[in-house]
Image (tube, rainbow, N blue to C red):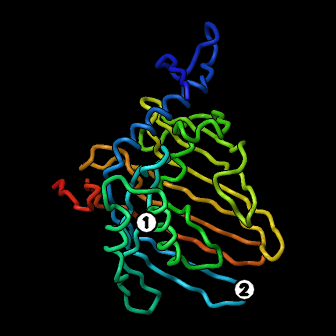
Amino acid sequence: MSRVFLAAAAFAVLGFGAEPKPDARAIVDRASRWVQQFERDFITVIADEQYDQFASGPSEADRERRLRSEIVFLRPESGNSWVAVRNVLSYADAGAPSVEVSDSADRLRAALAGGRPQATALRRLGDESARFNIGDFPRNFNTPTFALQFLDDEHRHRFKFQVEGREAIAGDDVWRLAYHERSHPTIVQANFRDTELVGTLWTRASDGAIVRTRMQLTASARGEYSGLETTVIVEYERDAKLNAFVPSTMQEEYREPRGHRVTARAEYSNYRIFETSARVISTQ
């Protein structure tokens, strides 16, 4: 895919005394370059995840579950797609002892066996981990870096981007970049039909670093399946060990018209380098 590299300035002045007008293409290009560097750097990174999920509904008891997992960032052998995959190590429902997932290490080793993993092995690992989610909403896209893919060369052409404005986050000058998926079939299928993704990316004006993402999707009702409103927000912060911006928290909300609701919060820590043989390398 050909790319246009524009001047470093993220705005163009229209005339003397005029307010700067954002150069949307320059902002998108800078953010895209940052994402693709992030993907190159993170194909050898693993992190710990503590993931708390809460489910409620009009005709069922509330449920609460805590997952402890590893998140692995990988690029499959086939294709250029870059993915983050969850490997659940244990889970604990409210008031119950923690249950270890006995085959978790074996599943991770199998997915990473032989160097660069196959996409089918990663998909299988992701689907296996998705079975530990609670609530009536099957999902396998609830990983912290999912929205970053919308800016890489593999998927960028599928989206329309628009600069919404700028603000300060943690002392940084940041652009708000809205996106809307316009290609079909869509990346996420809900209720067995296309579901366009929309949301916002907050990108640092100085270097394009992503500091926050918000992803929303609305699944319409179909047959026995009710509609569903989904929102996923991820915050990024600098990790001193890796000297890079990394996901720090992920918050989710899933709502359907009949009153069922799932909310979740994940926290990420202990980012470290690993080899594709599944041997973790200490960075202490």
Residue in the picture at 49% in, 19% down: 9
Residue in the picture at 71% in, 43% down: 183
* Left or right of residue 121: residue 57: right
Percent coordinates x, y for residue 171 in the rendering: 42, 39
Q: Residue furthest left?
A: 284
Say which quarter of the image contains residue 48: bottom left
Determine contact: label 1, label 2, CB under 8 Å. Answer: no
Mark 2 highlights which residue? 58
Q: What is the three-letter code of the residue carrying label 2?
A: Pro
Q: Residue furthest top?
A: 16
Say above or below: 233 vs 257.
above
Nearer the observer, 220 or 257? 220
Task: Indicate the secondary structure of the residue bearing disc 2.
Answer: loop
Q: What is the three-letter code of the residue carrying label 1?
A: Arg
- The image quadrant where one finds the N terminus is top right
Residue in the picture at 78% in, 72% down: 226
- Residue 39, numbered circle: none
Mark 1 highlights which residue? 86
